[in-house]
Amino acid sequence: MSALSIKHQLRLLIVLAIALLAAIWAVNRHYQAQAVQGHQARAQLAALELGLTALRREERDFIADKDERHVTLFSSLFTSYLSDIAALRSQMQTMGLDDTMLAGLEPAMQAYRDSFETLVAKQRDIGLDHESGLYGVLRQAAHDIEEVIKDKPALYASLLLIRRHEKDFMLRRSDAYYTRFMTTLSDLRGQLIFSDLDFETLAKVQVSLRAYVQAFDTLSQQERDIGLKQSQGLHGVMGEKIAEAEALFAGLRDQLQAKLDEHIRQSVLVSTVIVLSVMAALTLILMLLARDLVRRLQRAVDSAAALGAGHWEQAIQVGRQDELGALLGALETMRRELIAKTAKIEADGRLKNRQAELGTVLQGVKEVDVLSEDVIRYLTPTLQCQVGTLYVLDGEQLRFAAGYGVESAAIRQRSFEVGEGLIGQCVHNRKLMRVRHVPADYLSIMSGTGGSTPGTLLIAPLIWNDQLFGAVELGSLGEPDQDAEGLLELMSEAIAIALNAALVRVKMAKVLEEAWEKTELLEKQKQETEAARQILEEQAAALQASEEELRVQQEELQAQQEELRVTNEELEAQTRLLMERTRQLEQQQGRKSA
């Protein structure tokens, strides 16, 4: 087995286990089926016993309560009981058991049912309550007598005594009370003969009394047929039938219980032997497999221990290409990933340290140009670059803000549109850009002995909150620091935030200056407005005085106009008078001339 791989060993173990289980199943199936059948038969037997108890309970409840509901329940339970007997017989035949006693139980139970139904029919004739059957007839006859003799105390007392003996007979079911009933009845008949009732009333009472006595005799005979005691009449017959059925059931139960116990013991024994055999076989196989696995996995444990001790530099030999080889290969992969993750953790540590240093550089309240100068002077040597520039977005253009290793005045005067040149294209794309083979006239690294074009160029946009603030451009003769790109991407947002703060301060300063100028202008306008208001108030006062003088003049003019109107009226009256006199004079002169 040691020459097999773990997978093949597991397959072999599964095949052996399946073979063992198949053999066990083939042997155990018969006994398990018998055990199941035994438990089912036991459950059915318990159901029969409970059903018989339920039938007896409904029988007694009917005898006590005389309620049709118990008859209905008895019939339903009896039907279910016969079905349970048939099911148990079928189960016993399947198990190969003798069902002779069970076959005799069904007719015994049917005889018990017939006796119960006969008793129920008799009880219906007698009456299930005081208003039905013979009970109702007896009660009505007694009421008829009471209506006639209720005014005769002696007769009424005798009738009440008779009624008490009647009820005692019904309750205690004894012939002694029947005898008392008849004796008291004879006394009442004698009292009726010597009573002062008239002939018609006496005849009516005797007719009702005969009906009452006849109903009582019939009822008492029916009660005797049912049985004044449990051992008499229909009660006795029903008791014999149920006793026979119960005796058959008890014998059946003892016989079947013994058989079931035997079947269950055999099933438990066989099942125990089978389980122990399977456990022993599987334990042996597992021990052999475990010993082989321990030996083969020791190499992997040693390699894992060396790995846990920190000896990562020693490669793990994979060896054979099986599950063990896959495990050793996984350990080798883990070793390499640990080395890579350690290197990444160290790189992350360097990045965080440099971020902290940049945070120190960005601290304080600085102007945009001062901040840009500090940033470029920190970034360029930190990322092992020799030249660097920082551009700030001014409107739609990238304006040169600071440089490191840049001496050319032309470069310091540069500005780019968004999308123009490498730096403009980087800002347009909003992604970090690494450029190799930099054009000779693009950016130069200046020193005291000469200048050179950088071999690699890193350009990163400065973006925060999806808003562009500028760009950083770094150049190196060789390759920059290995963490340069990652660090530049992490730092660009912090630089953008600092630039935003600086630009906001500039804007706030301009806003405050403009606000101060507007305040002074508003103050001046306020003073001018106050002077104009005073002038307007003076003009208003003068205008009010002019209006008062004009009003007086208007009143004088109106008076003069009134005087003129009166004078005109007088002149018109004098004119008319003068014209009248003139006309009269002309008439006089005319007459004189004639």
Image (spheres, rainbow, N blue to C red):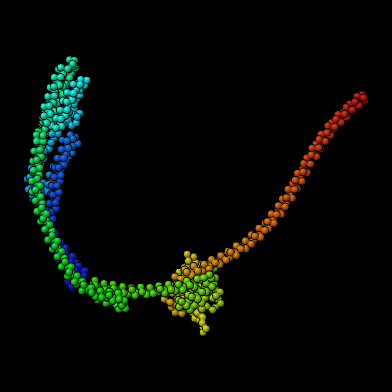
Provide residue 477's location: percent of width, then percent of height: 46, 79
Task: Pick the residue in front: 136 or 101.
Answer: 136
Residue 7 appears in the picture as rendered: yes
Provide residue 461's location: percent of width, then percent of height: 48, 70
Task: Pick the residue in front: 62 or 264.
Answer: 62
Query: From what the image shows, is residue 257 above or below residue 432?
Result: above
* Residue drawn at x 85%, y 32% as measured from the top left: 574
Q: Residue furthest top?
A: 199
> How many marks do you count on the picture?
0
* Residue drawn at x 52%, y 67% as measured from the top left: 501
Report which quarter residue 65 is drawn in. top left
Query: From what the image shows, is residue 401 above or below residue 170?
Result: below
Query: From what the image shows, is residue 171 above or below residue 256?
Result: above
Report which quarter residue 550 is drawn in. top right
* Residue drawn at x 21%, y 73% as measured from the top left: 296
Quadrant housing the N terminus: bottom left
Q: Is residue 94 left or right of residue 588?
A: left
Report which quarter residue 529 is drawn in. bottom right
Q: Is residue 335 left or right of residue 481?
A: left
Provide residue 471's location: percent of width, then percent of height: 49, 71
Query: From what the image shows, is residue 569 above or below residue 407?
Result: above
Residue 472 appears in the picture as rendered: no
Q: Is residue 425 left or right of residue 331?
A: right
* Residue drawn at x 69%, y 55% as measured from the top left: 532
Quadrant housing the C terminus: top right
Q: Residue furthest bottom?
A: 449
Q: Residue furthest right?
A: 593
Task: Pick the residue in front: 250 or 100.
Answer: 250
Provide residue 244's location: percent of width, then percent of height: 8, 41
